[in-house]
Amino acid sequence: MHLIALAALSVLACTKDDADDTGASGGLVTDQGLYALLVSYTPDPPVAGDTTLTVEIHDAATDELLTGSTLTVTPWMPDHGHGISDPPDVVEDAGVYTVTFAYSMPGTWELTFDVDGSLGVDSAVLTVEVE
Amino acid sequence: MLGLAALALWSTLLPLRAQAGACCVGSTSTVPTRLGECEKGMAGLSLGGETAVGRWDGEGALGASSLQDDAVIASVAGAFRWDRKGQVGLSLPVRLNHKGLADQDLWGGGAGDLVANVVWDPFVELPTGGPGKALPVPILTAGLRLPTGRTWEQAEGALLEDVTGLPGPGLLVGLSMERTLDKTPWSLGVDSELARDHDHLHPTVTFNGSLGRYLGTRWSVVGVGRHQRSYALDGTGGSASRTVLGAKLALGKAMKWRTWLGAEGDLPIPLLGHGNLRQVSASAGFALVR
């Protein structure tokens, strides 16, 4: 299932205009293999301050775009042991989730995506280098 | 950002770091506010500024920082010697932080974390001149950092510009070897802090050294260097490090007062730091000594 999901993600990522070799945008599969997440950043590469993530949630087995899921994003800076002061704002529009928040400083951040959707509850962690 | 707090914490610890027993050691130590053997107490104030000039990424490569990150830090410190072998001290920093992006300037600050520290100086340092009389002596320190500052969880600023402290208390332990009675006093040591953040433990280890020179009876200069590394014991975090060099010029009158001017900076060399902003800083201070 993971191989299918990763293959689907690679196709998805290549179709995104803003996903390039230098940016952080791309795809990942949740820990239990339920969901494939396609994440794009604005700005990309990420910098300190306001940022916007666009997240698509797909069925990892069929590549179907899923709607109506609950997505929670938690930024965490492991090297310094802190998060952010204002929780990210998440808005869904037809299966596309727009997430807005502010990175408080440059460095290595972890974004934890918790998905509660039609396939169950699953999560994934994405490491991001903020310039 | 917490790297800034860690640096500030280190600065607050400096007046309390142990050195050996020369009366004028306060003028040749890394910060001249510490007590020499002939001194009973001190009260001091320092004022400094720091700014980020770049960063080390997680792999140790140098890069530019998209965030302007500055702070003005005032620290008050006091120390009292109750015995030849022991002294106790308190210090408290107050921070004014500035975070700047292309389209916004944010300010915040307040009191930081209070640090209490005990210095144990068990051996008398002997003057040069005979067999075994030029040996360095060991100095032990122990202390507690109290989370009196504003933590990131309490912060309201969008870029955490109002953070002034760490989220939990810290246990401080240090050991150094020092030689202060020669014309070129020096020290080598290690300081550590075991910080507790909710259910997580975060140790920080700092290797430091200093090499000074007396310039007549009142003036002295000292160079300092340190490498600091922080970890997360329980796997909840990564590791970060930095390497700093600096110098301090001091002027003082024994058992009356001393004043100093110093500057230091993170070395712009790859792999000497990881996951931290690179900073430069300068500070000045004055202390009354009795």
Image (cartoon, coloured by chain):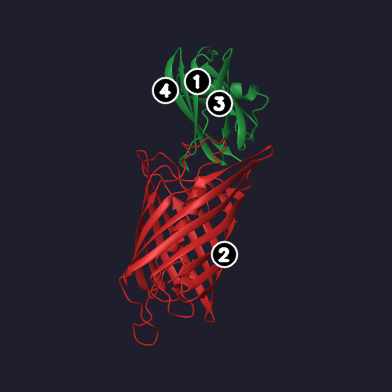
Chain colours: A green, B red
Q: Are marks 3 and 2 in contact (CB under 8 Å)?
A: no
How packed mark 2 is, by other alpha carbons closer than 10 Å (few <14, some 14-19, many 20 or more), is many
| Mark 2 belongs to chain | B
Which is in the foreground here, disc 2 or disc 4? 2
Query: Which amino acid does the dot numbered 4 rest on?
Result: Gln
Q: Secondary structure at mark 2?
A: strand
**Are the residues under marks 2 and 4 on the same chain?**
no
Task: Look at mark 4 in the image and give the residue it sits on.
Answer: A32
Q: Earlier in the sequence, mark 1 or mark 4?
A: 4
Task: Tell if the residue under mark 4 belongs to the same chain as the one under mark 3.
Answer: yes
Q: Are marks 3 and 2 on the same chain?
A: no
- SS of the residue at dot 1? strand
Location of mark 2 (residue): B262
Badge 4 or badge 3: first in the primary sequence: 3
Q: Are marks 2 and 4 in contact (CB under 8 Å)?
A: no
Residue located at (35% from left, 69% from top): B138
Q: How much space separates mark 2 and mark 1, taking CA atoms?
A: 50 Å
Count residues near mark 4 (Cα–Cα under 10 Å), then give few for <14, some for 14-19, many for 20+. Answer: few
For this rendering, which residue is in front, B286 or B224? B286
Q: CA distance from mark 2 to mark 4?
A: 54 Å
Among the two numbered marks 1 and 3 on one chain, the one whose residue lies closer to the N terminus: 3
Counting from the top left corner in percent of width and height, residue B81 is at 35, 68
Distance Cα–Cα, label 4 vs label 3: 15 Å
- Say what secondary structure mark 3 lies in: strand
Q: CA distance from mark 1 to mark 4?
A: 16 Å
- What label does residue A71 carry, if any? 1
- Determine which of the numbered discs, if any, sits on residue B179 in the image: none
Q: Amino acid at mark 3?
A: Gly
Disc 2 marks which amino acid?
Gly
Asked if B97 appears above or below B219 in the picture, the reply is above
